[in-house]
Image: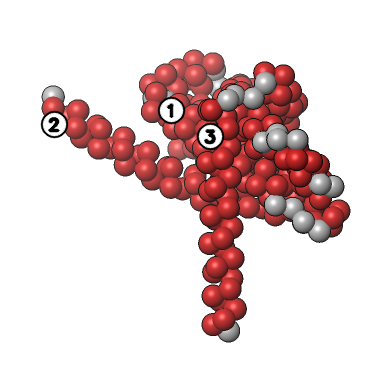
């Protein structure tokens, strides 16, 4: 039993080491010699433009649910005007980044892993190396750059769609005026909330691309291995995104509290 635990622990540490090594190799390749614009442009379109519909639907329907739940829970307590603030804060700070990362991982991350995994098992990646082409610079770096740029943009698009979806429900079903819905947002949604959502989306984009590309580049076992790697990449990305969300929430709020205390004492 102890031997199995040691082997499993060694395998986990080896996987983490390989993943960190890939991240550094991709970052070095992206900064040392940026990939061709055509490669990045294609990935920007694939990750960003092609994900707009699923991100819009997800954000819009989430806004529906948030507005309905907020009104039903708070309306009878005389707090119906808080509906807009709850929808806005939830979409900008928490649900927008999480749901967007999940949707992009399911639609794009799985595709990345399957594509790179197929190239790996058919020895196309080895062929690139034989032609002195760095596979990290040619295959992974364009996806990394596009993911880091597009996931935050898609997140804010999802948040805006959620806010508009919440307003549609609040105004049409619960007869909440635009002023009661939007005006409290200007008071209670701060620049810190927007920055928190942006930082989370940025980190989630990095995790999604690197994990899915790593699993694709490590694929073995033919067609069955590609399917297994694709499933593992999505599950691992979801898990890491949720764990990272918790730590980012704690860290960013602790930093914000310290800065506020510093401003108070300095004032």
Disc ID at residue 172: none
Q: Which of marks 3 and 2 is in front?
A: 3
Of mark 3 and mark 1, the one earlier in the sequence is: 3
Residue in front for this viewpoint, 134 or 47: 134
Identified at 84% across, 55% down, the residue is 222
- Other residues around mark 3 within 10 Å, as few (<14) / some (14–19) / many (≥20): some
Identified at 53% across, 34% down, the residue is 28
Disc ID at residue 195: 1
Identified at 74% across, 27% down, the residue is 46
Residue behind mark 3? 28
Q: Can residue 145 be seen in this view?
A: yes
* Residue 5 rendering spot, x and y as whole percentages: 56, 76
* Residue 87 rendering spot, x and y as whole percentages: 53, 31
Of mark 1 and mark 2, the one earlier in the sequence is: 1
Q: Residue furthest top?
A: 179
The quarter of the rendered structure image containing the C terminus is top left
How many marks overall?
3
Identified at 54% across, 35% down, the residue is 27
Left or right of 228 on screen, residue 165: left
Badge 3 element = helix
Residue in front for this viewpoint, 211 or 53: 211
Residue behind mark 2? 265
Marks 3 and 1, how far apart at CA = 27 Å
- Other residues around mark 2 within 10 Å, as few (<14) / some (14–19) / many (≥20): few
Instruction: Locate residue 191: give its quadrant.
Output: top left
The quarter of the rendered structure image containing the N terminus is bottom right
- Other residues around mark 1 within 10 Å, as few (<14) / some (14–19) / many (≥20): some
Q: Measured along the vertical axis of the image, is residue 30 above or below residue 115?
A: above
């Amino acid at each position: 039993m102890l031997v199995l635990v040691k082997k499993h622990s060694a395998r986990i540490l080896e996987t983490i080491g390989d993943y960190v090594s890939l991240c550094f190799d991709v970052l070095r390749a992206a900064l040392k010699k940026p990939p061709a614009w055509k490669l990045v442009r294609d990935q920007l379109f694939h990750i960003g433009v092609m994900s707009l519909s699923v991100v819009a639907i997800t954000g819009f329907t989430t806004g529906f649910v948030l507005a309905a739940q907020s009104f039903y829970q708070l309306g009878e307590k005389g707090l119906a005007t808080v509906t807009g603030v709850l929808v806005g804060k939830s979409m900008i700070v928490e649900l927008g980044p999480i749901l967007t990362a999940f949707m992009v991982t399911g639609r794009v991350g799985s595709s990345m892993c399957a594509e790179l995994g197929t190239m790996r098992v058919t020895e196309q990646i080895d062929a690139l190396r034989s032609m002195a082409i760095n596979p990290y610079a040619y295959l992974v770096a364009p996806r990394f750059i596009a993911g880091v740029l597009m996931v935050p943009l898609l997140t804010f698009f999802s948040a805006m769609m959620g806010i508009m979806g919440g307003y549609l429900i609040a105004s049409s079903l619960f007869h909440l005026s635009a002023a009661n819905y939007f005006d409290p947002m200007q008071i209670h949604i701060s620049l810190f909330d927007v920055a928190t959502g942006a930082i989370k989306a940025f980190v989630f984009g990095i995790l999604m691309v690197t994990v899915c590309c790593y699993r694709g580049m490590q694929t073995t076992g033919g067609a069955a291995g590609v399917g297994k790697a694709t499933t593992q990449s999505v599950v691992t990305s979801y898990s890491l995104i949720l764990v990272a969300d918790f730590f980012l929430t704690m860290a960013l709020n602790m930093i914000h509290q310290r800065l506020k205390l510093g401003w108070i004492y300095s004032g």
